[in-house]
Image: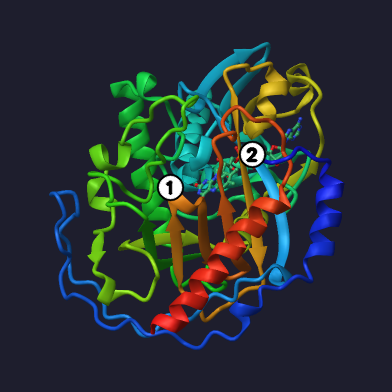
Amino acid sequence: MHAERDESIERRNFLKGSGVAIAAAASIVPLSVRAVAPDPIPVDGDTVPGPKMRQRSPLAPIRASMDRVIFLESCLRPFRPQGPRIELEKVGTKSIIHNYGHGGSGWSLSWGSGRQATRLAKQAGARQIAVIGAGAIGLTTAVVAQRAGFKVRIYTKDMIPNVRSARATGVWSPSARIVALEHATPAFRKLWEEMARYSYAQYNALLGVPGNPVEWIDTYKMSDTPFAKGASLYTHAPYPNEPEYPHLEEEHTPDLMSAMQELTKEQHPFPVDYVRRMNTMMFNIPAHAQGLLQDFLARGGEVVIREFESPKEFQELPEKTIIHSTGYAAKALLGDNSMVPVRGQTAKMIPQPEVDYAISYDSQNFYTVPRRDGMIVQEWSPGDYGNEKEVAYIESTRASVDKLAKMMAAMSGKS
Ligand SMILES: Cc1cc2nc3c(=O)[nH]c(=O)nc-3n(C[C@H](O)[C@H](O)[C@H](O)COP(=O)(O)OP(=O)(O)OC[C@H]3O[C@@H](n4cnc5c(N)ncnc54)[C@H](O)[C@@H]3O)c2cc1C
C-alpha cells in the first residue's frame, strides 16, 4: 500500500524524481501489428460478434517516462450506492432539484442527467433557473436547460479547470460505480437507460466539432490470465469492501457496446498473453468543457462565483427554481452521508497526437488514454473505495509509467 504523505511533499518528490527518465522508452522504433483477423473470434460465447474491424497501421509507441509527466492529480468519485440523487425537493419558497452523486459515470451520463433535471425544473414551472455547480453535471445541465428554453444563471465556487470533473479520465463509462446492485430497481434501470442513450447520442453529435471534444479510439484490453466470461472494459470488478454492481450496459444497452475482438499473439505487438481490441468513445475533457462553457455564455448564460456554506443560503437567490449539482461537495453541504468517496488518481504525460489507442491492463493496475491534452495514466487500488484522501501518490504513477515503458521496450523488440 502507499505510504501516506502530505501532498506538497508528494509534489516536491515528483518534481525531484521527474529527471529520472526511463531511458528504454525514448529510443523505441515504430511498431507493426503483424496481422489482424478479419472477423471477431468468439470466446466462450462472450465476445460480441460484430462488424469487421479495420486493419491497423503500425501502432505509434507511447513515450513513457517520468520526465514527460506534466500533471499528477487525485480526485473523488461521488458515489451513492442508491444511485445519483435526481429529485425535486420543495424548501421554503424554492424548488430545489438535486442532481449529484454520479460516481464514475458523471461525464458519461451528464447529458441525460441534465435532461432529467430539466424535466423536473419544467414541473416546477419557472422559466428562470439557477444551477449551483459547474462541473460535468452543472455545466452540461445548464446547457441542456438553455436548449429547453430556460434562462440560466450558474452559481459556483470554482470553474473549470479547478473542478473535480477536470481530473477524470475521459471515456464513455456510464455504468462505472453508478449504483449498487441491491439498489438497481426497475425504475432506476429505466432512468439509467434513458440517460445513457441520450448522452450517447449527444456525445456522438459532437464528433468532428473543432477542437475534437469527442473521438473514437481503439482500446487494447489486456490480461495475464484468460478473460472472465462477460468481462468488458466498463464493468469494474469490485474490491472486497465494495458493493456488487449491476451489469447495466450488457443488460440494457448492449447495442451501444463495442464488439470485442480477441487477438492472437501474432495479431498484436504487446508482450501480454491475452489481448482484446474494442472501440471506445473518448472525451477530450478540456476541449469539451470549454465548448460547453462557450455554448452556455453564447446563449446568454451568466456565471456568478459564489460559495454556499449552507443550503439555507439557496433561499437568498432570486431564482425560484434551483438545480443543485455540487458533486461530492453535497456530502458536507447537505449532510448527505449516503455519499461514498471513491478515490482516483490520474497523471498526464506530454501529449502524443500520433498515439490513437488506449491500453487497459487491470491486473497491472493501469489504464492509458491518448487524450489530445495529454497521455492519461490512471491507476486504482483496493484502498480507493471509501477513501476521502484526495492525495496523489507519485510512487503509483512511477510504477505504472515504468510498466508501460517496459511494455513499449518489449514491443519494439517484438516487432
Ligand atoms: C480518477 C477518476 C476518473 C474518472 N473518469 C471518468 C470517465 O472516464 N468518464 C466518466 O464519465 N466519469 C469519470 N469519472 C467520474 C466523474 O469525474 C464524476 O462523476 C464527475 O466529475 C462528477 O461531476 P460533478 O459535476 O457532479 O462534480 P464536480 O466536478 O465536483 O463539480 C461540482 C461543482 O460544484 C461546485 N461547488 C462545490 N461546492 C460548492 C459550494 N459549497 N458552493 C458553490 N459551489 C460549489 C464546484 O466548484 C464545482 O463547480 C472519474 C472520476 C475519477 C475520480
> In the displayed structure, does residue 298 sit left or right of residue 81?
right
Query: Could you tell me how far apart the alpha carbons at marks 1 and 2 are, in whole angstroms?
Result: 27 Å
* Residue at mark 2: C-beta within 8 A of ligand 1: no
Label 1, residues with CA under 10 Å away: few <14, some 14-19, many ≥20: many
Q: Which residue is mark 2?
A: 1
Q: Residue at x 50, y 35 (%)?
A: 118
For label 2, the SS is loop
Nearest to N terminus: mark 1 or mark 2 = 2
Type of the residue with mark 2:
Met
Q: Which residue is mark 1?
A: 173
Q: Residue at x 64, y 44 (%)?
A: 135
Name the quadrant containing residue 276: bottom left
Q: Residue at x 62, y 82 (%)?
A: 26
Residue 362 makes an appearance in the image: yes
For label 1, the SS is loop
Quadrant containing ligand 1 reads top right
State the colouring used for the structure image.
rainbow
* Disc nearest the viewer among 1 and 2: 2
- Viewer-nearest residue: 70 or 408: 408
Name the quadrant containing residue 99: top right
For the N terminus, which image quadrant?
top right
**Residue 248 screen position, x and y as percent:** 31, 36
Type of the residue with mark 1:
Ser
Label 2, residues with CA under 10 Å away: few <14, some 14-19, many ≥20: few
- Viewer-nearest residue: 322 or 289: 289
> In the displayed structure, does residue 8 sit left or right of residue 272?
right
Q: Residue at x 43, y 67 (%)?
A: 207
Vertical placement of residue 202 versus 7, above or below: below
Residue 288 makes an appearance in the image: no
